[in-house]
Amino acid sequence: LFTAVEMAPRDPILGLNEQFAADPNPHKVNLGVGVYYDDNGKLPLLECVQAAEKQMMEAPKARGYLPIDGIAAYDSAVKGLVFGADSEPVKSGRVATIQALGGTGGLKVGADFLRKLKPAAKVLISDPSWENHRALFTQAGFTVETYPYYDAASRGVNFDGMLAALQATPAGTVVVLHACCHNPTGYDITPEQWDQVIAAVKARELVPFLDMAYQGFGQGIAEDGAVIGKFVAAGLTFFVSTSFSKSFSLYGERVGALSVLCDSKEEADRVLSQLKIMIRTNYSNPPIHGGTVVATVLNTPELRALWEKELGDMRLRIKQMRIALVEKLKAAGVKEDMGFITTQIGMFSYSGLTKDQMVRLRNEFGVYGTDTGRMCVAALNSKNIDYVCAAIAKVL
Ligand code: LMR
């Protein structure tokens, strides 16, 4: 039965974790996967999460099946966070939200639904994009193509190229857009440029699918989510996948969501009924723990305030690491101006290093980033940054 089964390549991101775990180098640093570590190199267990878990332990509950679309209090907290609790879409009931297995799960439920709804549509992702976007939409049955995004020469976004591509895209094409903290480049478009993208999406009747996995890691929760309001104001219907993996440091709990903004409550009810079929036939219904933690925090004012503070601290530390990285690379002898690192936002820096240089970093120094040159700045700390800078200086 399995004689013809080929060995698949390692996952370009999570596969690095396997390689990192097996690396005996005592100085090794994992800048591969997008995970935030504190200044001691530890994965944080947020205080707001601990407080919510304490509450849950004090009133233990039996674990029945959740509804297919998840915990109602979680779904409504997601709607509030993404669209605004008092926003017209939420108040009118025209958002269909499901609790998903992380942001990836939200994307996949949305992709499976879209594939049924628009089987002939193509999917456009940014060039480059999160490595899993292409794989995920391809697995869902779509042909995946790209629109220009990164401009290596100017170390920024090739916005003219992006816009021209969208303006030339056939109606009905699904366009995956990073709502904030573009992964992998760290370069976002400006609010004015978003307006132009939205105009093109509207004029060409494209299907926007916003991926918002890093809300709060750029400028702030509201600032990073502002683009959602722009799409709402433009009168568009769209998909948005969200994740609490990073913002709650709950990677292993798989807590994310998919929200679909529809034209009316009646339409949202029909869409939700279809999303539930996608879920039921994949994993039946979501797990309880992580969703309950997030719902408890978001729905309890003191815990919500604590979460915002803790998320703000993470955001600030990443920014400090960016500044330190630029200074220390210079001190390590790098001649090139690395100042672009501080104009990038979110967890990543698209370093401009070649695949060969990234492989050397890994093999000779135990410094792991993706082959595309992406490094997770959120995994740098005051103890490993000098070593990392010396290694980068050597391969440059
Ligand atoms: C990343 O880009 O490293 C993260 O989103 C983790 C993942 O699932 O790939």
Image (cartoon, rainbow, N blue to C red):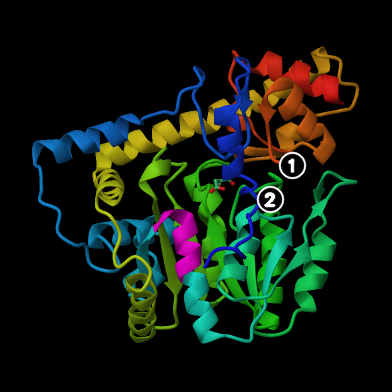
Query: How many residues crowd around disc 2 within 10 Å: few (fewer than 14), some, or many (20 or more)?
Result: many
What's under tag 1, amino acid-wise?
Asp
Which is nearer the N-term, disc 2 or disc 1? 2
Q: Which mark is residue 371?
A: 1
What's under tag 2, amino acid-wise?
Asp
Q: Does dot 2 land on a helix, a strand or a loop? A: loop
Q: Position of residue 257 (x, y in %)?
A: 40, 60
Q: Which residue is mark 2?
A: 188
State whether residue 109 is above or below residue 172.
above
Residue visible at 74% across and 42% down in the picture: 371
Q: Position of residue 331 (x, y in %)?
A: 81, 13
CB at disc 2 and ligand 1 closer than 8 Å: no
Q: Is residue 327 at all visible to an observer of this figure? A: no
Q: CA distance from mark 2 to mark 1?
A: 21 Å
Q: Was residue 171 drawn as part of the magenta stretch in this picture?
A: no
Apparent side of residue 279 relative to residue 142 in the rendered image (left or right): left
Q: Which residues are magenta?
A: 101-109
